Amino acid sequence: MRLSKKKLTSTAKKEILTSFYQLIADIKNYQEAEIICRSLLSKAEKVAIAKRLAILWALSQGKKYSEIRKKLHISPATISKLQLDLKESGARKILEKLAAEKWAAAKEEKIKNFFDKLLK
């Protein structure tokens, strides 16, 4: 993705970012998120964001740089930058959300298996 060489005024930039953040906040479910991301982001941008999320998660789980690099085909500099970001509130919030999603998915699977066995 290339950015225009012409800079936005700080007021215009603030207004645009405010609208973007509000759009993100208003997404109600997976389907809406998928539709919006499909229209808003290029394939490369979606993959880049997904890789960053995967790197944060892997780092939080104690994975080694070499393992992350091999699986995600990314540079050590990218991992290093995200390692530093782990101390920031945004990265902590991302990890909280990812952990909650993984927890819910695991519980959903256990509940489904319980009812499957119960109804056999």
Image: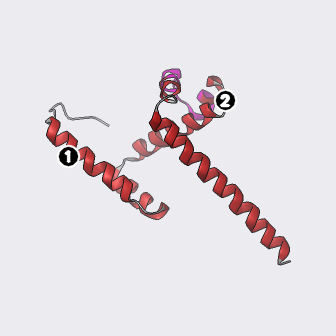
Q: Which amino acid type corresponds to the residue marked 2 in the rendered image?
A: Gly
Q: Position of residue 72 (x, y in %)?
A: 57, 34
Q: Quadrant of residue 4?
A: top left
Q: Position of residue 94 (x, y in %)?
A: 51, 42
Q: Earlier in the sequence, mark 1 or mark 2?
A: 1
Q: Position of residue 38 (x, y in %)?
A: 39, 55
Residue at figure coordinates x 20%, y 40% from the top left: 13
Q: Which residue is mark 1?
A: 15
Label 1: element kind: helix
* Magenta region: 69-80
Q: Which residue is mark 2?
A: 62
Decide whether residue 73 is among the magenta residues. Answer: yes
In the picture as drawn, the residue positioned furthest to the bottom comes out as 119
Q: Position of residue 35 (x, y in %)?
A: 40, 61
Q: Quadrant of residue 14?
A: top left
Residue at figure coordinates x 80%, y 68% from the top left: 114
**The N terminus appears in which quarter of the rendering?**
top left
Q: CA distance from mark 1 to mark 2?
A: 38 Å
